Amino acid sequence: MWPANAAAAAPKATLLSINAKNKPVKEVFAEIEKKTEYIFFYSNDIVDVNRRVSVDVKNGTIETVLDQIFRSTDNSYEIKDRQIFIVKPEKSAAKKSESARQQPGTNRITGTVTDAKGNPLAGVNVIVKGTTIGVSSNIDGTYVIDVPLHASLVYSYIGYLNQEITPGAESICNIVLNEDNRVMEEVVVVGFGQQKKESVIGAIQSFKTSDMKMPAANLTNSFAGRIAGVISVQQSGEPGADGANF
């Protein structure tokens, strides 16, 4: 039986036809992506993409195709807009209950982190203040964390104002983060982190136009010696070709 939680939420019904006989899963994925706007996301540790399957669907939904691909496997799927995430099914209720057992003296907090427009924020750091205990929100903006009693939580995300709360007896804490316009103006995100703008922009210098009034046939010769770090070279003294190179 297919897991009941394998529901799909595509923006509109997409019907497709696929007739694949004994083909690797990765080739079927590629054919689906070619015929539709869907894109697959998965880990090779979760999906055996070399497993051979047979799929025969004519004018069927994407769910019908995926049901045939993952029949008799422990994989399930989640469809969000045009993205298809291949996942493992949740643990059994007994194992889930055992793994979810709280530590003594803690309060389990769950919730969702969104921006001011209600869009979920993925990758938000949720840290127990003063400790290294923390989690990150998932693709839906949701999080789960065990918090010591009377401790505070700090929510942080690049480009947004930090927010701190003390959950107390609350078990559900939905957070709305507001953009930090000041930080967005002063910080530049680079490939290895973030830096202040002044550290990634060269020095700026200027001089008055009156300082350029000098006996020179070419305006470029007037810049020589007036801008730090700029080397001016005059290759020739030939009339009409005596402009400086920088």
Image (spheres, helix red, strand yellow):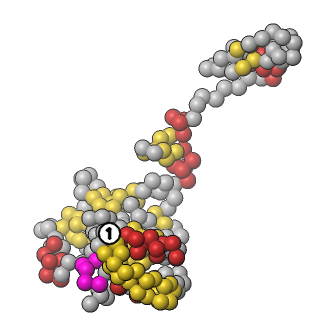
Q: Residues within 10 Å of mark 1 (few under 14, many from 20)?
A: some
Can residue 211 be seen at all in this image of the molecule?
no
Examine the residues drawn in magenta and state their main secondary structure: loop
* Residue type pointed to by label 1: Val
**What residue is pinned by disc 1?**
49
Residue 33 drawn at (x, y percent): 48, 72
**Relative side of 116 to 101, left or right:** right
Residue 74 drawn at (x, y percent): 24, 78
Q: Residue at x 42, y 44 (%)?
A: 192
Quadrant of the image occupied by residue 157: bottom left
Q: Which residues are magenta?
A: 71-76
Q: In the rendered view, tell whether residue 118 sits above or below residue 5.
A: above
Q: In the rendered view, tell whether residue 238 sits above or below residue 164.
A: above
Q: Residue furthest front?
A: 21
Q: Residue at x 51, y 58 (%)?
A: 179
Residue 150 drawn at (x, y percent): 23, 64
